[in-house]
Image (tube, rainbow, N blue to C red):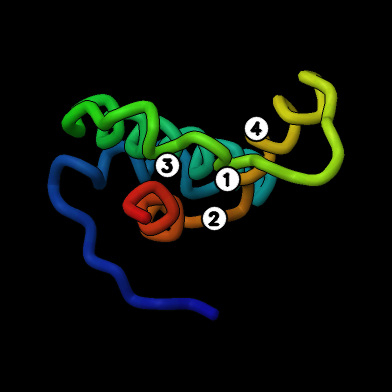
Amino acid sequence: MERNITLSPEALPYWNMIKDASPKVIDELGYYINTIHLYRKIKNRPKRDFDEFCGIWASDSEVSADELTKEVRDSGKGKTTEELLKIWER
């Protein structure tokens, strides 16, 4: 699906640099940009109480640290910035 999007004058030079890149490169850059954008939003949010997150990954079976790390790392892949922000705002 192709959409008409008008870029700002500030963004246009960057688009011109990558517009002919392969879909893989564009996907990687998009994921990286979304991750940085989300990180900055999260970093600037007010601090919350730790108790709010207690039991967030509670389950009947214990997972290894490697499995948990992979689950957290992969949880945002393929999601838009808006989808990730909704997850963090819950």
> Which residue ends up furthest to the left in the rendered image?
9
Quadrant hosting residue 67: top right
- Tags 1 and 2 touching, CB below 8 Å: yes
Q: Quadrant of the N terminus?
A: bottom right
Identify the residue at image location x=37%, y=55%. Answer: 90
- Pair 3/4: label in front: 4
Q: Earlier in the sequence, mark 2 or mark 3?
A: 3
Name which residue type carries label 4: Arg
Name the secondary structure under disc 3: helix
Residue 4 tag number: none
Residue 73 tag number: 4
Residue 59 in the image, given as x and y percentages of width and height: 75, 45
- Disc 1 target residue: 76
Identify the residue at image location x=74%, y=29%. Answer: 68
- Tags 4 and 1 touching, CB below 8 Å: yes
> How far apart in space, not on screen, are marks 2 and 3 (Cα)?
9 Å
- Disc 2 target residue: 79
Name which residue type carries label 3: Asn
Towards the viewer: 29 or 82: 82
- Tags 2 and 3 touching, CB below 8 Å: yes
Name the secondary structure under disc 4: helix
Identify the residue at image location x=27%, y=39%. Answer: 13
Identify the residue at image location x=38%, y=39%. Answer: 52
- Disc 3 target residue: 34
Name which residue type carries label 1: Gly
Q: Earlier in the sequence, mark 2 or mark 4?
A: 4
> How far apart in space, not on screen, are marks 3 and 4 (Cα)?
14 Å
Q: Residues within 10 Å of mark 3 (few under 14, many from 20)?
A: some
